Amino acid sequence: MAIQPRPLPSETITNLVPPLPGFPFFEHADRFRFQGDAATYSAINAWWLADAGFLVYGTAEFVREGFGNSPLPDLGFTLQWLGTEDDNRGIILQNDEALVVVFRGTRLQSHTLMDVAEFVVIHEDDLRTDSQFLPAVFRAGGHVHQGFRDAFAEVRDQLDALVRAKRPAQQLWLTGHSLGGALATLAAAHIEGASVRGLYTYGCPRVGDLPFVHTLPQQSHYRFVHRDDWVPTIPPELLGYVHGGTLHDLPGAGPRKFWEDVTSGTDLLMAAAKTMARQLRIDVGKLPFKVSGLTDHAVIYYATLLWNDLVALERRGPNEIQVQ
């Protein structure tokens, strides 16, 4: 049966704030198996790791369900938590060939006010982490974002234990979206690049200065940016922050069209307003969310567009999706 590309999400807060119930995490992972030994860019791994970076935003129950409903258990993968199950910094997916550490990005929380209004805010712990942006010394070398460094320190010992316990045949992969990408980058520097088979980040902010970047893997380090995603533009370069890795723009994104955004945003707003009037309740999640740099940061775009790229490559021929 031919596989199909996925439609882009309707740009409302509910559809763009992870996790998204009903999203087909790792669907067809039995057909496109994770390439643990890839030494250069892999379109399969780019999609697979984006899905992992999307799933990790869920609660423990959500993650277990998404993992359990996917082909991964039948492929020998197991699920563990980075940190505690209820307050994790990420998840660990491993089988005989690969050890994949997936760091979670900044959480957004939905709150209800007096049962008549719903609003979305940044989790206070993650907001504190993101806001401590002044450079601080990093043990592996150079200077890095202080908040990122302190957040990574919470799981450093567990990560070290994972690496020590890794079986010789397992290849180590690190990934994450947004803040998760920053923590994956710190992990790669901490572990030392030679031990890391791949580092793929999505919408990742700048993490450290040039001496820090020199500690990162020089191969299989790929940094994906969707359209006008603003997070990769911070912290500012004037503080000495620079990016590492090979930049990959997301395929198939295309430029934003201002008037289309205005028109579709108006339609979404009117539909949401009518629904709220009927229900006598303000539901922020149904409102349009078309602020270019913020909208483009949504992890669902990274997972969807990289899947669509994989579909397009397969249609060109099986050789197109081999390790490149």
Image: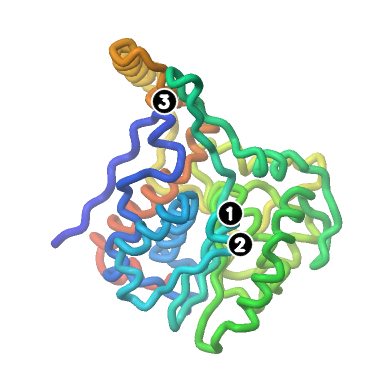
Which residue sits at x=72%, y=52%?
148
Residue, disc 3: 257
What is the spatial separation of the Cα atoms under label 3 and label 1, in whole angstroms?
39 Å
- Residue reaching furthest bottom? 168
Q: Secondary structure at mark 1?
A: loop
Which residue sits at x=69%, y=40%?
234
Task: State the quadrant of the C terminus.
Answer: bottom left
The 10 Å Cα crowd at callout 2, few under 14, some 14 to 19, many 20 or more, is: some
State the mark number for residue 12: none
Colour mapping: rainbow
Residue 129 locus on image (x, y percent): 71, 45
The 10 Å Cα crowd at callout 3, few under 14, some 14 to 19, many 20 or more, is: few
Residue 204 locus on image (x, y percent): 60, 49
What is the spatial separation of the Cα atoms under label 3 and label 2, in whole angstroms?
42 Å
On the rendered structure, is 166 left or right of 268? right
The amino acid type found where label 1 is placed reads: Asp
On the rendered structure, is 267 left or right of 216? left
The amino acid type found where label 2 is placed reads: Gly
The image quarter in which residue 44 lies: bottom left
Q: Secondary structure at mark 2?
A: strand
Above or below: residue 193 compared with residue 123: below
The amino acid type found where label 3 is placed reads: Lys
What is the spatial separation of the Cα atoms under label 2 and label 1, in whole angstroms?
7 Å
> In the rendered structure, are the residues bearing label 2 and label 1 in contact, judged by CB atoms less than 8 Å apart?
yes
User: In the image, which is nearer the foreground, mark 3 or mark 1?
Assistant: 1
Task: State the quadrant of the N terminus.
Answer: bottom left
State the mark number for residue 87: 1
Residue, disc 2: 83
Instruction: Work out whether residue 200 can be spotted.
Output: no
**Mark nearer the N terminus (3 vs 2):** 2
